[in-house]
Image (tube, helix red, strand yellow):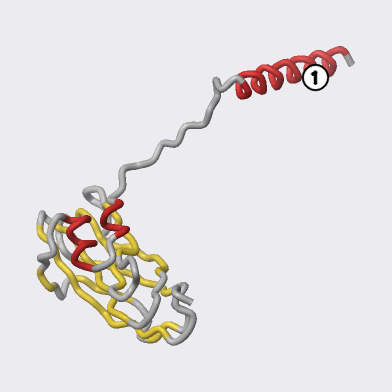
Amino acid sequence: MILKRRTFLQRTLATSTVAMAASAGLMAPRAVFAEWPKNAFMAKGVPEALTGLLGTTSANDSDQIKIKAPDIAENGAVVPVTVSTSLDNVESISIVASANNQPLTSNYILPAGTEAFVSTRIKMAKTSDVIAVVKAGGNIYTTKKEVKVTIGGCGG
């Protein structure tokens, strides 16, 4: 019984100390965010998004990039998209939905030696091209696929 009583008193004291420190502002939460390309994600058009993300809008079309997405998306709120490439030295893969109000949907930075493959679900406001942008070996490559949204796009 004494052991349980001592344990209870120790925990009560510890909890009280933490509560006092928090109320005094000694344990204030601090927001720590990773750096992200805010201008690219907030851009209203594809050229602005690419410039904000990669510093340029020029990209080479490539048949080595594969986009797997449905031809017709029944629900624009959850459109599955998979991007893979056989290009060497892939640094990043980005996905853009050209008709969205903010077209850049995602950007993945891939460490060296990582398989160049991403799979995600994006929101699409309406029928548009889904564009895959791959940065590999310092060059930018792209390919696109049209996805038709039938109902329930992210706009309503």
- In which quadrant of the rendered view does residue 47 lie? bottom left
| Image location of residue 148, percent across then percent down | 36, 85
How many numbered circles does the render carry? 1
- In which quadrant of the rendered view does residue 122 lie? bottom left
Q: Residue at x 56, y 22 (%)?
A: 25
- Label 1 element class: helix
| Image location of residue 5, percent across then percent down | 84, 16
Q: Residue at x 12, y 73 (%)?
A: 61
Residue 132 relative to residue 155: left or right: left
| Image location of residue 81, percent across then percent down | 36, 71
Which residue is nearer to you in this view: 69 or 103? 103
Q: Residue at x 31, y 43 (%)?
A: 35
Q: Residue at x 87, y 12 (%)?
A: 2
- The correct choice, above or below, for 37 with respect to 6 in the image is below
- The correct choice, above or below, for 21 with respect to 89 in the image is above
Amino acid type at circle 1 is Phe
- The quadrant the N terminus occupies is top right
Mark 1 burial class by Cα count in 10 Å: few <14, some 14-19, many 20+: few
Which residue is nearer to you in this view: 107 or 99? 99
Residue 45 relative to residue 71: left or right: left
Q: Which residue is mark 1?
A: 8
